[in-house]
Amino acid sequence: MIEELYEALHRELTKWLGAVTGNRTLAEDLVQEAFLRALLHEDQLRHLSFPQRRAWLYRTAKHLYLDRRRHDSFETIVEEIPEKTAENPEYDRIDSEQLLTALEEEERAMFVLRYLEGYNATEIGRLFDLPPGTVRSKLSDARRRLRRCMDNRKGSP
């Protein structure tokens, strides 16, 4: 059963955590750790449907990431980006990733799931143990915050 889950969800979880963390290596480590936890809880997971197992893995991975953030000190190294970013699409991608860092961890995770991965509010709510209305409200707040950040960037030299 765990092997089937791994084959079905490893890539998806790694992609999601990569977007949330901004670090592919960390994402891969967290996914491996989540599947190790799944092995330890295989008896419980066996009684769940596939969508419930999937939600369990997402929640576990999210909690592992939050625990890691609480216990580790992360240093962010920011390189200077040249002024003319329009000539290089790689800088546009970096700029978008930096913009997402304006969001809180949970908002960023929800934003990525909704707008980059295509999940709806109900599915995201299951992953975060929240009602869909709360998810929609949090996404609205996230969009508002990103809009303000973008407006501030346009106004600065």
Image (cartoon, rainbow, N blue to C red):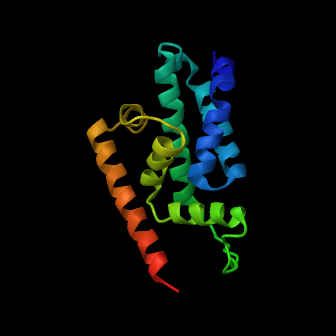
Q: What residue do we see at 49% from left, 37% from top? A: 118
x, y percentage for residue 28? 70, 43
Q: Give the side of residue 27 with respect to residue 150, left or right.
A: right
Q: What residue do we see at 36% from left, 32% from top? A: 122
x, y percentage for residue 130? 32, 38
Front in this rendered view, residue 31 or 9 = 9
Query: Against 58, is 42 above or below?
Result: above
Name the residue at the left extreme: 133
Q: Is residue 36 visible?
A: no
Res 15 quadrant in image: top right
Q: What residue do we see at 38% from left, 64% from top? A: 145
Q: Is residue 14 visible?
A: yes
Q: Give the side of residue 128 with respect to residue 42, left or right.
A: left
Query: Against 79, is 101 above or below?
Result: above
Query: Against 107, is 146 above or below?
Result: below
x, y percentage for residue 135? 33, 43
The quarter of the picture where the N terminus appears is top right
Q: What residue do we see at 48% from left, 13% from top? A: 47
Res 3 quadrant in image: top right
Q: Give the side of residue 137 with respect to residue 81, left or right.
A: left
How many numbered markers are drawn? 0
x, y percentage for residue 96? 57, 61
Name the residue at the bottom extreme: 157
Front in this rendered view, residue 89 or 105 = 89
